[in-house]
Amino acid sequence: MYIDIARRNLERAKIRSVLAVVGIFIGVMAVGAIGIFGESLKVAVMQNFEDVANEIVVYPNPQQGYSYVEDRDIRTIEKIPGVKSAIALRSDALSLEFKNKKIIATVYAMDEKNLKEMFEADKGSIKLSSGSCVVGKRLADFLSLKIGSKITLEGRELKVAAILKDVGARFDINPNFAVLVSEDDFKKISGSEVSMVIVKAESLEDVPEIKKAIEERINKKEEKLIVVEMKMILQTIENAFGQINLFLMAIAAISLLVAGVSILNIMLMSTIERTKEIGVMRAIGAQRSTILKIFITEAAILGLIGSMIGSALSLVGGILIDYAILQDWSYALQPSTVFYIILGLSVGISTAIFSGLYPAWKASKLEPIEALRYE
Amino acid sequence: MKIIELIDVQKIYKTQYYEVHALRGISFDVEKGDFLIIMGPSGSGKSTLLHLIGCLDKPSAGKVLINGVETSKLSDFELTNLRRDNIGFIFQQYNLVSTLTALENVELPMLFKGTPKNLRQKRAKELLELVGLEKEIDRRPNELSGGQQQRVAIARALANSPSVLLCDEPTGNLDSKTGEQIMKIIRDLNEEKGVTVVLVTHDVNLKKFGDTVIHLRDGKIQEVEHVH
């Protein structure tokens, strides 16, 4: 019956109650939808890095005077259990000529097998025999390169065998603006030594062990190599996105705060309007706690209705924002979305109840005799 | 058996600038089954007296005992329980809860006591029948006449079978004919059910319903009149 009493009290000021519910559902929707979008954004970005998660990148340590990774160390790394492959990478910035255009391009020396494993061809087929090369998508677009085009690298002519698909941001190598050539060809045009070794682990779980083994076997005497786990970088990025999401949701929560203030306001008004009725109830035997219960129930009903509508709409909102910004609404359909819907729901209900606490307390503190005299 | 006992009761209202002596040493007893009428002009302290008996207020000095319990020694929680279980209030403005039906209004004191729903509804229906409103149980206060509302208020006052019924100008807002009907209901409750009644009024026509009339003036008892 207390719920009934509370519900009817809300019904007697219908418009006011509806407006309070609208306030709550806008707030809940904002928090939920932004939470869903933030998570989608994270997933969308992290997808680009998915295939580098099991990598360890090894660089020479310039602070100890090392400018390249020695062959012997590469062989040591290859022998560590759990290592699937160790891709030694030589790179240099070299002059490139094609049809009167002359630019400086990044050139990587790579093994054909590794190259095929890491990247996909957009056009042509990946082949790094002597005299052929593979170019990145953006470089090809920039120079209008086609399959079979002949470019000149440091005076040496190479035929374009394949153009790679555009790849997202990476931390190891970025082939979009680069030319990839065979080890043999590279040695003829550049004297650069191995500047980076990409170590791929058999599985993600092997990564820490491999890192430890490299440190123990090669860096025992001095810090020859810098060993970086990609997973750690990804973790950092993920954390950063988590923080951005939290910040965005905090901004959205301001609207929920405003809704809370409006509940506080209407319930305070209601307390004043119902002073006499509270007095009557107290006179005929209602305890202070009973009055408190009725008012908090009213706030909870407002919160519950507003939050339920708001969380349902937050899914719609999340889908719309995902579609507008990421051009793919399916990101909104993932397990974490349920979390944000429940989060919105509980934050909305708590805000309403919290806002109702003070008016309820005030109502319960009315002296029955004073309240009865109130006109 | 003394249901109400007042011993040298004083009530002083203090404001920042002055003091009002509403009651200046009032003493009397009310026996079980009595019908006491307190009369006096406005400002004589009769409402203050009723509020003290009704445990809505505490005396500044002196003692108020309900069923032998001194009210000034009780906490707010205990006073509320005392009101709920021992006292039925009937107000001049009926004071029904506007959002609730007649039946639900009568159920309220029982709800506050924790009576189960089926028992609550059964008793509320019986009480509304007693005051002749068996057909109006689902109406809200604004769908009832003044007289009907006051009858609902009487039924509500009786909900927890109180030992005393406190009536504050119960006919003050009613025409004389309806007022007469309400008074008859209250008198019947007193005569047939043995309910103790304390009624405050300034209407001399109501004198005939009481056993004893206390005349109050300037916070003092001026005269005690035994009618029957």
Image (cartoon, coloured by chain):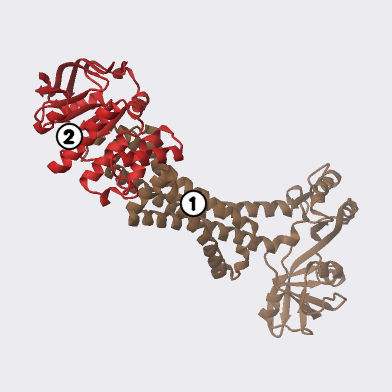
Chain colours: A brown, B red
Query: Whole-percent x and y of residue A54?
Result: 78, 56
Query: Whole-percent x and y of residue A35?
Result: 55, 56
Query: Whole-percent x and y of residue B25?
Result: 15, 15
Left or right of residue A40, residue B112 in this image: left
Between residue A133 and residue B208, name the one nearer to us.
B208
Residue ID at (79%, 67%): A118
The lab-note entry on whether marks 1 and 2 share a chain reads no
**What amino acid type should be assigned to the residue bearing mark 1?**
Ala
Left or right of residue A320, residue B101 in this image: left
Q: Which residue is mark 2?
A: B169
Q: Which residue is mark 1?
A: A250
Q: Quadrant of the N terminus of chain B?
A: top left
Q: Chain of mark 1?
A: A
Q: Quadrant of the C terminus of chain B?
A: top left
Do the CB atoms of the residues marked 1 and 2 lie less than 8 Å apart?
no
Q: Is residue A322 above or below residue B69?
A: below
Q: Residues within 10 Å of mark 2 (few under 14, many from 20)?
A: some
- Answer yes or no: is residue B200 visible: yes
Q: CA distance from mark 1 to mark 2?
A: 57 Å
Q: Is residue B33 above or below residue A98?
A: above
